[in-house]
Image: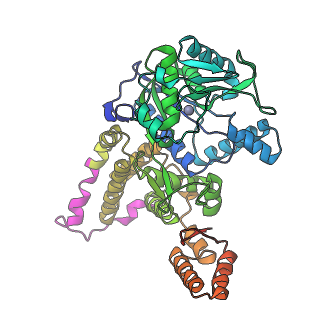
Amino acid sequence: MLKIYNTLTGKKEPFEPLTAGTVKMYVCGVTVYDECHLGHARSALVFEMIRRYLEHSGLSVTFVKNFTDVDDKIINRANELKIPWQAVTARYIDTYYRDMGRLGIQPATVEPKATEHMAEIIALVQVLIQKGVAYQVNSDVYFQVEKYGAYGRLSKRKLDDMQAGARVEVDERKRHPMDFALWKGAKPGEPSWDSPWGKGRPGWHIECSAMSMKHLGETFDIHGGGADLIFPHHENEIAQSCGATGKEFARYWIHNGFVQINQEKMSKSLGNFFTIREIFEKWGYREPVTAEALKYFLLSSHYRSPLNFSDQALLEAKRALDDFYDLFGRLEDSPSAKNSGKISDNDPVRKAAKQLPKAVGEFGEDFRDRMDDDFNTPDAIAMFHKLQTLVNTQLRIGFSDDCIKARDVMRSFGKVLGLFQLPVREWQFQDRAIKLEAEHLIPDSELERLIVERSEAKKRRDFARADEIRQALAAQGITLEDRPDGTTRWKR
Ligand SMILES: [Zn+2]
């Protein structure tokens, strides 16, 4: 039976959908003001894997993933680019579909937009005011957190601690510093909609409550998103939804872990930020090849673990896939010609190969065991490796039908993870990244050495040498940024 780690209870729990045979799942989508980055790719691939596995288990999944298409970030971007805000959202919805297409991610069953749900949002805010858990101040409406006794139950925080710990600007209009906006009165030039409180637009959190309840009902099975959304976004969604209905909202909360780059948190301000487009361009394989490498890399860690991205890690993922595709290719090329009579019955190779039929026969059940354990994809991937090794061992003795059965099993169960799906002739075996490194890139170790040398040059006031190093690196597309603490950050 499938067990899911539920952030709400802090435990792995047996998954029992509300209606047998069906799953209703909502995942917070992107705010469309910029291109999707690696963190978006991880979240998208994790929930794609979960959806496919639920379907593979015979469940019918209704999957809702929204677009946040009205937000401060969108308005700021529109002002920056001097274009209408609708042009910003249209542009980044397009790039979202381009990137998801590259990654091979299927569209959700419903992909609602906040701006197309104003009636539902306004109605929900009205209910919250009627129930006395929200209050109006001028043209704004706030949720009153003290009126929802269970506030903090998802993020395991106490309201008093939050108040003490939060460096919240004192806002005289709020009754409690943690109260959050459900509706914001319009400022001049901002997008706005008519409401009982005057022209304005929704706060961020309310849209997900309104859209999930509209498309999935007041109580549904799974709510997901990145771990960064637990607080305040998902905490606030729970407060709003339960505050309005008096019923449970989502029953299982699933959160995927962060992506780090070279052991640091990925963020624009740190400059270690990769968009999905950049990864596809940099690696330069055909898109489905890069996509599989990225999936293999992302699913090799458990979805809840933090994940460290580096070029090396992606390269290793690609090479692991090369080995699988190489094996598939050898099985296509007249395998029967490879019989070797030289290996005796008592040879360890022959003994090892005898495990192949059993491993093939039990693969489905073993795969289910791993995936039922909170979607343990790293263990599932390890099973594919084990099978691959057994087929290679069998091929040293000679071809057998079990080799083909093993390949078919790998291809068929690989579908759940989005792996091993390309025809062998479409796979690209050559190591493009290595070629790139030789042609253009300084290896990281050499780069670190030059940075140390430059800092030593600066210390002895040899600014000519320090500048020389900076310029040499700039010529390779690497910029250096000296930080106040004396260390230097670099960026390609
Ligand atoms: Zn949301």
Q: Residue at x 34, y 35 (%)?
A: 10
Going by the picture, which residue comes out furthest to the left?
Answer: 346
The verdict on residue 431 being magenta is no
Q: From which residue to which does the magenta span run?
A: 334-358
Apparent side of residue 22 relative to residue 103 in the rendered image (left or right):
left
Q: Position of residue 355 (x, y in %)?
A: 24, 53
Q: Position of residue 329 (x, y in %)?
A: 47, 59
Q: Residue at x 57, y 42 (%)?
A: 105
Q: Residue at x 51, y 29 (%)?
A: 236
In which quadrant of the rendered view does residue 129 lie? top right
In which quadrant of the rendered view does residue 183 lie? top right
Q: How is the image coloured?
A: rainbow
Q: Give the number of callouts.
A: 0
Quarter of the image for the C terminus: give it.
bottom right
Asked if 431 appears above or below 211 in the picture, the reply is below
The verdict on residue 335 being magenta is yes
Give whichever of 357, 377 is nearer the camera. 377
Going by the picture, which residue comes out furthest to the top?
Answer: 130
Give whichever of 83, 353 is nearer the camera. 83
Q: Quadrant of ligand 1?
A: top right
Quarter of the image for the N terminus: give it.
top left
Q: Position of residue 410 (x, y in %)?
A: 41, 48
Asked if 360 appears above or below 56 in the picture, the reply is below
Apparent side of residue 97 relative to residue 302 in the rendered image (left or right):
right
Apparent side of residue 233 relative to residue 347 in the rendered image (left or right):
right
Residue 93 seen anywhere in this rendered image of the structure: no
Q: Position of residue 89 (x, y in %)?
A: 73, 38
Give whichever of 416, 166 is nearer the camera. 166
